[in-house]
Image: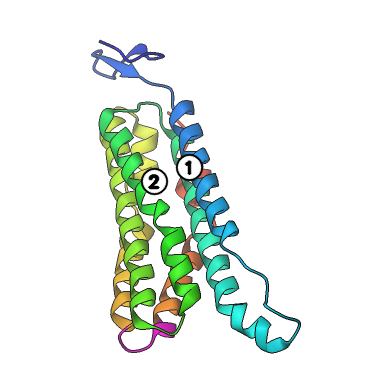
Amino acid sequence: MTSEGASRDTTGDGEPRDVIPTNRLESFSDGVMAVIITIMAFNLRPPAHNQWSAVAQRLPTLLIYVLSFTFIGIYWNNHHHLLRLTTTISAGVMWANLAQLFSLSLVPVVTQWVGQGADALFPASAYGVVGLFSAVMYFILVRAILRANHHDANLTRALGHDLKGVISPIIYAAGIGLAFVSPYLAYACYVLVSLMWIVPDQRLVRPQPRR
């Protein structure tokens, strides 16, 4: 039985498969990420007074907001390109996508915590745990999409080698460990991951042509 809005297609072996449009999944994900960014923006507060000391007091909150905004923006950008290539959505893909969104929904919590104590161990390590969790969930989402689209040689070639997807969790794990040495070393690791992903994944932006 096909899902509502699904169409019937055949694999390369001539076997039928369900093709579920990705637009609803992408629209839902876009909405969730927009709400996450909105929540973070609502947590911003202006300096208490006009003196530089008040600005300096709010500076860690602003910097971690910029990092978290970039963090969510990177996931939104790559998620868009990823679904643009995807032709088949399975139940596994839908659950993996929900897990990805759940991991991102934790970002406003740790962002506010770091803003309250940027030089403290536990907020810095918690931020890395959420980053690690999100990176692992994205990796799982990509694997789920590959399984659902194993018939698509173009997508398989584009996503077959995910070097950044493997390296990112390692850097986040290193950041969590370095937080016990200095929280600022941890933040340096988190910024490094964002810089690594700031340019959309070129495998998704310029996929190999279909043959």
Q: Where does the N terminus fall, quadrant-wise? A: top left
Highlighted magenta segment, given as a residue range: 180-185
Q: SS for tag 2?
A: helix
Q: Is residue 24 above or below residue 167?
A: above
Q: Position of residue 104 (x, y in %)?
A: 41, 53
Q: Is residue 59 above or below residue 139?
A: below
* Residue highlighted by disc 2: 101
The amino acid on which the numbered mark 1 sits, given as a three-letter code, is Val
What residue lies at 35% left-to-right and 48% top-to-bottom?
Answer: 102
Q: Kindly tell me whether residue 150 is visible in this rendering.
A: no
Q: Position of residue 189 (x, y in %)?
A: 41, 75
Q: SS for tag 1?
A: helix
Q: Earlier in the sequence, mark 2 or mark 1?
A: 1
* Mark linked to residue 32: 1
Q: Is residue 129 above or below residue 120?
A: above
Q: Position of residue 40 (x, y in %)?
A: 54, 58
What residue lies at 33% left-to-right and 38% top-to-bottom?
Answer: 156
**Total marks drawn?**
2
